[in-house]
Image: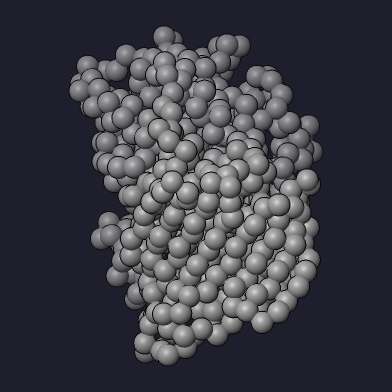
Amino acid sequence: MTRKPRLLIQTVIRLRPIQIRARLLKALKRKHSFAAPSSVRMRRDFKLIDFIDDKPFRKSLVPITRKIHNGSLSNWTSFDGSDLEAYQLHGFNFIWNSECSPNVDSAEDFVRRWIAACPAGRSPAWAPYPASLRIVNWLKLASRRGCEKLAGDGVFTDSLALQLLKLEGEIEYHILGNHLIKNAAALIFGGMLLEFDGGRRLLSKGLDILDKQIDEQILDDGAHFELSPMYHSIVLEDFLDILNLLKSNSAPADSETAVRNVISKIEDRTRRMLLWLKAMTHPDGGIALFNDSAFNEAPEPAALEKYYTALTGGSPVLPAANASFKDSGYHVINSGGISAIIDAGPFSPTYLPAHGHCDMLSYELSYNDRRIVIDTGAFDYHDAERRRVSRETSSHNTVRVNGGEQTEIWSKFRAARRAAPLGSSLKETDDATCFTGKCRYVIPRVTVERNIEIGKSGPFDVTDVVTGGAARYTVESFVHFHPSVRAKIESSSQGEAVLKASAGAIVFRVIAKGLKIELKKGKHFPDYDSEDEIYVVCMSGEVKSGESFGYSLVFD
């Protein structure tokens, strides 16, 4: 069998039946028929308590929104941007960013311009994901003081109802995951706040989807199952918005039981989700960039915690400096000025590989509240070089064996054979905290074990072992430095190589044990469509199966 069909088969056999059916219907271009409803009204008594209305936003879209606002770009689909940018633009997240939309009047103006410029059914404007974003954002906007005219505008409410009816027939069952949460949120918001024929049906459908997906997507340790701190934050905000809506407004009598059930589940899960997010947050207040994660795409952890506290009256606190999240496979160590977040979890949910990276046994590290070792991040979702590079094993702080890959990624959202975690744990002693984790690679078929030990006053010791059917393996161990780090090779001798680096007043050394050390230039993608040049340490050599190798980070 040639390579492409094999990869496709290896991918498809992991999909859910509902995904396969939805993809076949989509391929056959089966259309969902919908008609404009009559007598659409918005509830006059609806309210929301303060939500997150000041968000970071992708810098590349700021000039686009300004052109639309001043009338120099009348066609919302004519700008020269990526599909991802189009989704963000048509999703209307930008109205919560003061650079794009400084006040209520400008936000209302954007809404009216969009309705006039984007007739029903046009893509990407009416695609299900941006439509779901837009519906919730428009209804949140309508709840703001000063937006009474918008809430009572028949053109506005008619457009919302039409968008909801189209979305109802295009729920993203071909994708699932966080997209389904977005779809459900839009149906719930629309069904609760708009009164028209079919509104109650939409509410019931949204609640049913959400009820099932909360159990499916939120692991017992609080992690969203796609294991991206960015998407975790996005889903957490979705849940908090829904909780805000359902607790602040009375539900129709025939939906009261379902609403109470969803409220109970959200209150339970969001507490755990916030704890997990806190653990994935560096001392500088920003998230770790594991898997598909980037800055300025989701609310900051502090903003989410403030929102959670406003809705529930309190905020959970991590019980200890060190923590293990066994269901997601993530571990956190805080010792001797070092804050380390370690990834020993699965590549992705079995049926949803879209946002997974080859980052098993990788880590991010801060020292004295400053980021030192980082993940490469994610540049965009084009099927192109930067997308491929950002997901490779060599773009993470882990081990590559024989030049292969942990997981067989073959397209921008697809993966065939997957690496598998084989267990991980933390152990604390009087002198140190020790992490141990194992995983099985697919190219080549080997098992890699990593041990990380952090003493009370350092250093950060990493020891790896590769075992498999061959007698010897070529190994490469990578460390990616934050853009602020400057580095140079200090010495190299048989059995040990030393690299000296600094980040401001912080000075440290990387000491390789039994490996050759090289300093290379690499890329860091902190935001979508943004890149920085960084230093990457590559330590390489040939080792016997079962022979240990590694390095130490020693802070002066």
| Residue 18 location (% of width, % of height) | 27, 56
| Residue 354 location (% of width, % of height) | 46, 59
Residue at the extreme top of the image, as rendered = 45
Depth check: 484 or 146 in front?
484
The answer to whether residue 195 shows anywhere in this view is no
| Residue 190 location (% of width, % of height) | 40, 27
> In the rendered view, does 391 fall on the left or right side of 24?
right
| Residue 2 location (% of width, % of height) | 41, 88
- Residue at image position (49%, 59%) is 452
- Residue at image position (60%, 43%) is 337
Determine which quarter of the picture holds residue 267.
Answer: top left
Depth check: 140 or 342 in front?
342
Residue at the extreme front of the image, as rendered = 430
Q: How is the image coloured?
A: one colour
> In the rendered view, does 445 fall on the left or right side of 378?
left
Q: Quadrant of the N terminus?
A: bottom left
Location of residue 88 with respect to 469 vertically, above or below: above
- Residue at image position (78%, 47%) is 504
The answer to whether residue 150 shows anywhere in this view is yes
Q: How many marks?
A: 0
Depth check: 180 or 24 in front?
180
Determine which quarter of the picture holds residue 105.
Answer: top right
- Residue at image position (37%, 30%) is 271
